[in-house]
Amino acid sequence: MMTQSFLMLAAFLVVLLALSWPVGALLARVADNANRVLTAPQLLRSVWGPAQTDNSHYLRIYMVHLRHKLEDDPTQPQYLVTKTAIGYRLQVPV
């Protein structure tokens, strides 16, 4: 029997396959670190490279795109959660 966590992961993988760069790269990074907060510089470095760690506007723009793909109501995210002044977390039920 499949667990809810496994089904959730499978759903994210299906979405990931339909996404283009950099949205897909962001989803892959937060999925690899599910339920852990990643700082904006960590995400920027891993997707855009070390020269872009100060360009958090990129991250905000693409997180909005990702939320529109993942969330039922992107204005009230349940999965891709912002931790104010820290970063982002992909919240996956366990």
Image (cartoon, grey):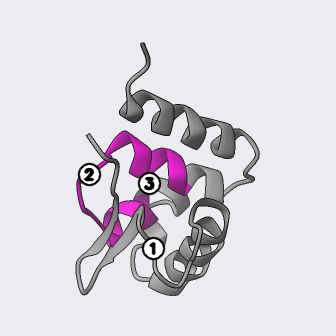
Which mark lies nearer to you, 1 or 3? 1
Q: Residue at x 33, y 56 (%)?
A: 91
Badge 2 or badge 1: first in the primary sequence: 2
For disc 2, the marked residue is 35
Res 45 quadrant in image:
bottom left
Q: Nearer the viewer, residue 23 or 8?
A: 8
Task: Tell me which amino acid carries mark 2.
Answer: Asn
* Residue 34 on the magenta segment: yes
Image x and y of residue 37, in percent: 24, 61
Task: Tell me which amino acid carries mark 1.
Answer: Pro
Image x and y of residue 67, in percent: 57, 69
* Gap in angstroms between the C-alphas marked 1 and 3: 23 Å
In the rendered image, the vertical position of residue 10 relative to residue 58, given as above or below: above
Badge 1 or badge 3: first in the primary sequence: 3
* Gap in angstroms between the C-alphas marked 3 and 2: 18 Å
Q: Secondary structure at mark 1?
A: loop
Q: Nearer the viewer, residue 5 or 25?
A: 5
Q: Secondary structure at mark 3?
A: helix
- Mark drawn on residue 77: 1
Magenta stretch in the rendered image: 26-45
Q: Dot 3, crowdedness within 10 Å: few (<14), some or many (≥20)?
A: some
Task: Tell me which amino acid carries mark 3.
Answer: Ser
Which mark lies nearer to you, 3 or 2? 2
* Residue 31 on the magenta segment: yes
- Mark drawn on residue 46: 3
Q: Is residue 36 left or right of residue 19?
A: left
Q: Dot 2, crowdedness within 10 Å: few (<14), some or many (≥20)?
A: some
Quarter the C terminus occupies: top left
Q: Nearer the viewer, residue 74 or 54?
A: 74
Res 74 quadrant in image:
bottom right
Q: Is residue 38 left or right of residue 5?
A: left
